[in-house]
Image (tube, rainbow, N blue to C red):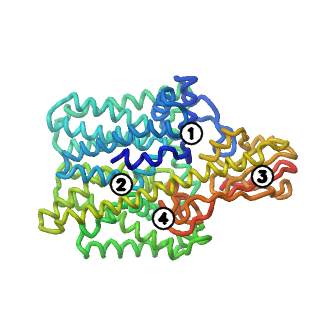
C-alpha cells in the first residue's frame, strides 16, 4: 500500500528544503567527516551551511549512500526514500499490535494522511525520523513487556538515530521514560538504555563545536526562538494555526468523526472552534493577515480554517478521551505523544507546519482504532463498511493534496527552465533571487544567486525573480526594467503553498491552511534587465 501510494510521485522535482539535504549529501561525498563545511546562499547572502540548516546530518548521509548506488536524479533519490516510508508504516503496524486490535486500520490511517504522503514525496528527514521513532517505541514496549534488555538497548540505539536524523527525535527520551514510570517498570530496567541517545547527542554537540565552533543542537534551539520573534505571530493565532494544521494534516480523523463521537461532542468541538476563530477575526482576520483575500474570499478561507480546526480539536480529544477511559501506561504514552507534538509545533517550533506535526500521525492512527474498538464494545457504530468508506475518503483527499504538491514542484521547475532557456544565452550574467526548488534548478542551469550584501550586478545583466518564494528583496525600479513576466500553470484548485490562496503547508507564516481549496494563481517569474545594481538590501525580505 505504501508503494502504491507513493510510486506515482517518484519523478517529483525537488522543492522546498530538499536542496539543503542534497547539497549536504554532495558535500559528504567529497568530505565525509565535514558535512556542513561549505557556504550556501539561502537567505540572500552566502552563509555557512551549519548556520543555515537546522537539522542533523544523518538523512544526508543516507542520501549520499543512496546516490552513490542509484545516482542523483529525482527518481533515484525518491526511490531511496521509499525505504524509510515503508519502514515507518510497518513500524506503526508493529507498534499498533500491542496497543489495539486493529493494527491494519491504524497503519492505513497513518499512511493516508496529507502530512505523511506529502512528507513521503520529499527527500527531507521527516519520514526517516518517523521510521526510527515508531520502531524505537515498538521495541521499547516489547522489551518492557517481555523483560528483554536487548530490545530496550535496540530502542535506545534507534532513539539516537532518530535524534541524529531530526532533533525532535530526542523527545522520545522523556516520552518513553514517562511511559515507563507510569507503567511502574523497574528504574534499572529502562534507565540505562536511555543513556545511549543522551550520549549520542552529547557527542554530536562536542563534534559540531569542534568542527564549526558552535554546538548545532543548541543553535537550532536559538534559531527557533529568533524565527518566532521574526514572524511575530501571537500565541492565540499560533494555537489556532496548529489546530488547523492538525485537523487538515490528519484529515482522516475528520472523516471518521461521526463514527467516533456522539453528536453532542461534535457540537462542542464546532462551538469551541467557532469562538476561537471569531476571536482571531475580531482581532484582525487571520486569513486577511496572510493575504488570502487576493484570489480567495475571506469567508472561504475562514470556513476552511474552522473546518480543519474542528478536526484538530477532535484529534486532541481522541487522546484525552482514551486516557480518561483507560487510565493505563499505554494511554498515557499516546496522550503525551500527541499533545507533546502538538504543543511543540504550536509554541516551540520556529513556525507551525505540516512536517512538525507528522510525528503524531502513528499515535493518532492507533487512537482512532482504539476508539472504534471501544465503540463496538459499547454497541455503537459497528458497521465495518462505514469505516472503510471513511478511510477511503481520507485516502482520496490525501492523494489529491499530494498530487497538488507534485504539480506545484513541477511548475517551479518549469518556471526555472523556461527563464533560463529564454534568457540564459543573452549577453551579461543571469542572476536570480529565490530559494528552495527554484534555486536548485536555476543553479543546475548555470544561473547565479544574487548576494544582496556583495552584489556583483552590472548593466546588461538579467535578474530573475519568482513571486511564490521566500527571502525576496525588492527590485529598485530606477535600476532595472521589467522585461517580461513568465506564468507557469501549476495546481488549479488545490495547493499546499500559495499565500494568495491561503496555503502554507511548509510554514504557517505564509498561509493559515495546510492546503487550500479555491483558485490557485500560476507560478509567476519576473525578468528584469539591469541598468545598475538592483537589489535594495536595506529592505526586509519577504
- The residue singled out by tag 3 in the image is 536
Horizontally, residue 204 falls left or right of residue 461, namely left
Quadrant hosting residue 85: top left
Gap in Å between the C-alphas at discs 2 and 3?
45 Å
Query: Sequence order check: which comes first, mark 4 or mark 3?
Result: 4
Q: Position of residue 229 (x, y in %)?
A: 56, 54
Query: Sequence order check: which comes first, mark 2 or mark 3?
Result: 2
Q: Are marks 2 and 3 in contact (CB under 8 Å)?
A: no
Quadrant hosting residue 367: bottom left
Q: Position of residue 28 (x, y in %)?
A: 54, 27
Gap in Å between the C-alphas at discs 4 and 1?
29 Å
Gap in Å between the C-alphas at discs 4 and 2?
28 Å
- The residue singled out by tag 4 in the image is 237
- The residue singled out by tag 1 in the image is 20
Horizontally, residue 43 falls left or right of residue 110, namely right
For discs 2 and 1, the disc positioned in front in the rendered view: 2
Pick whichever, 507 or 402, lies toward us.
Answer: 402
For discs 1 and 3, the disc positioned in front in the rendered view: 1
Horizontally, residue 48 falls left or right of residue 363, namely right
Say which mark, if any, is on residue 112: 2
Say which mark, if any, is on residue 3: none
Query: Sequence order check: which comes first, mark 2 or mark 1?
Result: 1
Amino acid at each position: 500500500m505504501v508503494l502504491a501510494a507513493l510510486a506515482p510521485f517518484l519523478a517529483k522535482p525537488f522543492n522546498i528544503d530538499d536542496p539543503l539535504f542534497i547539497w549536504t549529501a554532495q558535500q559528504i561525498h567529497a568530505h565525509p567527516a565535514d558535512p556542513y563545511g561549505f557556504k550556501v546562499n539561502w537567505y540572500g547572502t552566502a552563509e555557512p551551511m551549519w548556520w543555515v540548516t537546522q537539522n542533523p546530518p544523518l538523512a544526508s548521509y543516507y542520501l549520499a549512500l543512496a546516490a552513490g548506488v542509484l545516482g542523483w536524479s529525482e527518481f533515484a533519490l525518491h526511490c531511496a526514500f521509499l525505504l524509510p516510508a515503508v519502514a515507518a508504516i510497518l513500524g506503526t503496524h508493529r507498534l499498533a499490535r500491542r496497543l489495539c486490535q486493529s493494527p491494519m486500520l491504524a497503519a492505513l490511517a497513518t499512511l493516508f494522511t496529507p502530512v505523511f504522503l506529502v512528507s513521503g514525496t520529499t527527500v527531507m528527514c521527516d519520514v526517516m525520523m518517523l521510521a526510527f521513532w515508531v520502531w524505537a517505541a515498538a521495541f521499547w514496549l516489547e522489551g518492557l513487556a517481555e523483560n528483554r534488555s536487548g530490545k530496550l538497548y535496540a530502542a535506545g540505539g534507534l532513539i539516537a538515530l532518530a535524534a541524529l536524523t531530526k532533533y525532535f527525535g530526542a523527545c522520545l527520551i522523556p516520552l518513553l521514560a514517562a511511559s515507563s514510570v507510569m507503567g511502574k517498570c523497574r528504574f534499572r530496567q529502562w534507565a540505562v538504555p536511555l543513556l545511549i541517545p543522551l550520549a549520542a547527542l552529547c557527542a554530536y554537540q562536542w563534534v559540531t563545536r569542534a568542527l564549526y565552533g558552535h554546538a548545532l543542537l543548541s543553535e537550532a534551539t536559538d534559531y527557533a526562538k529568533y524565527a518566532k520573534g521574526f514572524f511575530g505571530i501571537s500565541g492565540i493565532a499560533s494555537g489556532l494555526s496548529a489546530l488547523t494544521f492538525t485537523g487538515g494534516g490528519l484529515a482522516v480523523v475528520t472523516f471518521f468523526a461521526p463514527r467516533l463521537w456522539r453528536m453532542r461532542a461534535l457540537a462542542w468541538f464546532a462551538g469551541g472552534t467557532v469562538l476561537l476563530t471569531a476571536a482571531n477575526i475580531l482581532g484582525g482576520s487571520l486569513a486577511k493577515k496572510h493575504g488570502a483575500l487576493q484570489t480567495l474570499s475571506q469567508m472561504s478561507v475562514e470556513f476552511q480554517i474552522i473546518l480543519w480546526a474542528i478536526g484538530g480539536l477532535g484529534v486532541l480529544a481522541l487522546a484525552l478521551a482514551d486516557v480518561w477511559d483507560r487510565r493505563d501506561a499505554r494511554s498515557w504514552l499516546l496522550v503525551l505523544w500527541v499533545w507533546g507534538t502538538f504543543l511543540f509545533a504550536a509554541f516551540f517550533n520556529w513556525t507551525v507546519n505540516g512536517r512538525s506535526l507528522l510525528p503524531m500521525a502513528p499515535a493518532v492512527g492507533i487512537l482512532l482504532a482504539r476508539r472504534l474498538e471501544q465503540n463496538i464494545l459499547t454497541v455503537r457504530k459497528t458497521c465495518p463498511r462505514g469505516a472503510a468508506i471513511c478511510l477511503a475518503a481520507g485516502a482520496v483527499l490525501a492523494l489529491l493534496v499530494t498530487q497538488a504538491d507534485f504539480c506545484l514542484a513541477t511548475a517551479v521547475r518549469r518556471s526555472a527552465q523556461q527563464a533560463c532557456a529564454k534568457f540564459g544565452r543573452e549577453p551579461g550574467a543571469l542572476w536570480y533571487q529565490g530559494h528552495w526548488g527554484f534555486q536548485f534548478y536555476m543553479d543546475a542551469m548555470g544561473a547565479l544567486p544574487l548576494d544582496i550584501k556583495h552584489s556583483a550586478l552590472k548593466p546588461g545583466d538579467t535578474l530573475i525573480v519568482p513571486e511564490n518564494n521566500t527571502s525576496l528583496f525588492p527590485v529598485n525600479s530606477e535600476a532595472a526594467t521589467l522585461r517580461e513576466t513568465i506564468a507557469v500553470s501549476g495546481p488549479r484548485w488545490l495547493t499546499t503553498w500559495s499565500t494568495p490562496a491561503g496555503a502554507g503547508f511548509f510554514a504557517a507564516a505564509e498561509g493559515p491552511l495546510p492546503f487550500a481549496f479555491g483558485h490557485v494563481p500560476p507560478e509567476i517569474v519576473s525578468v528584469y534587465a539591469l541598468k545598475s545594481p538592483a537589489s535594495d538590501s536595506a529592505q526586509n525580505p519577504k
